[in-house]
């Protein structure tokens, strides 16, 4: 695949200039896409990293997206992974879907990622952007860049992780879902309430 070859070539270019304590990764931007082979891409990386956002906070948050994508990310190298993008507040390309998470949902999001094998969780964005395509993807800080409810929750969760970090130590899960692009395409064509997974 051209994408796989390009990313392997880029990874080697970066690796040739990395120091011994640096690693090579790329943000997959969401897993299980039918136009790429994530497993082949992962072979050229030191760590798998994914963009796992929770679309539809409030009553629509069910942690299914985090779990499915986390299990899939972990299965690519049979190792923990990085969440290099997750959302803090509301998401969408327009003002029509601006529902910030309920109190506690940002914390739940972090612990869901950790329980699925994430060793890192980064927010997209830290501060909301004031113009451009992602104006409505609100970060930890809103457009006024002042501490707010989301900032307070992220701060509390970060302090909790400081306390339990030595105990947690980057857990290693021993099971993961297996999925392939073929059934994902079937679900896209004819959606069902459950994802049907089959081996290729």
Image (spheres, rainbow, N blue to C red):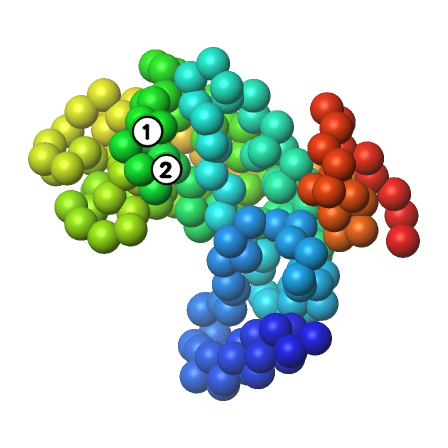
Residue 174 seen anywhere in this rendered image of the structure: no
Mark 1 against mark 2, which lies toward the viewer?
1
Residue at 75% across, 36% down: 190
Give the answer, above or below, for where 161 lies relative to 50. Answer: above
Which label belongs to residue 153? none
Q: Residues within 10 Å of mark 2 (few under 14, many from 20)?
A: some
Residue for badge 1: 96
Instruction: Give the residue number, with chain letter if any, for mark 2.
Output: 92
| Residue 89, above or below 197 | above
Nearer to us in this view, 62 or 45: 62
Evaluate whether residue 11 shows in this view. Answer: yes
Mark 1 falls on what kind of element? helix
Viewer-closest of 18 and 99? 99
In which quadrant is the N terminus drawn? bottom right
Residue 129 percent location from the top left of the image: 20, 46
Kindly state the secondary structure of the residue where label 2 is placed. loop
Place of residue 85 in the rendered image (x, y in percent of width and height, measured from the top left): 42, 47
Image x and y of residue 74, in percent: 67, 47
Who's the residue at 49% across and 67% down the image?
23
């Amino acid at each position: 695949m051209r994408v796989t070859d390009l990313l392997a070539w880029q990874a080697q270019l970066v690796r040739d200039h990395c120091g011994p304590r640096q690693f090579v990764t790329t943000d997959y931007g969401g897993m299980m896409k039918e136009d790429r082979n994530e497993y082949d891409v992962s072979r050229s990386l030191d760590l798998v990293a994914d963009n796992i956002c929770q679309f539809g906070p409030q009553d629509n948050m069910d942690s299914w997206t985090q779990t499915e994508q986390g299990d899939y990310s972990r299965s690519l190298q049979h190792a923990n992974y990085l969440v290099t993008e997750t959302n803090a507040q509301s998401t969408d390309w327009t003002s029509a879907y601006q529902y910030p998470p309920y109190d506690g949902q940002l914390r739940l999001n972090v612990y869901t990622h950790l329980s699925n094998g994430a060793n890192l969780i980064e927010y997209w964005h830290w501060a909301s952007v004031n113009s451009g395509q992602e104006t409505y993807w609100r970060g930890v800080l809103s457009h006024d860049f002042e501490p707010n409810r989301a900032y307070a929750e992220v701060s509390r969760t970060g302090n909790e992780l400081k306390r339990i970090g030595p105990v947690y130590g980057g857990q290693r899960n021993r099971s993961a879902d297996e999925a392939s692009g073929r059934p994902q395409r079937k679900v896209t064509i004819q959606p069902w309430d459950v994802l049907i997974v089959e081996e290729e």
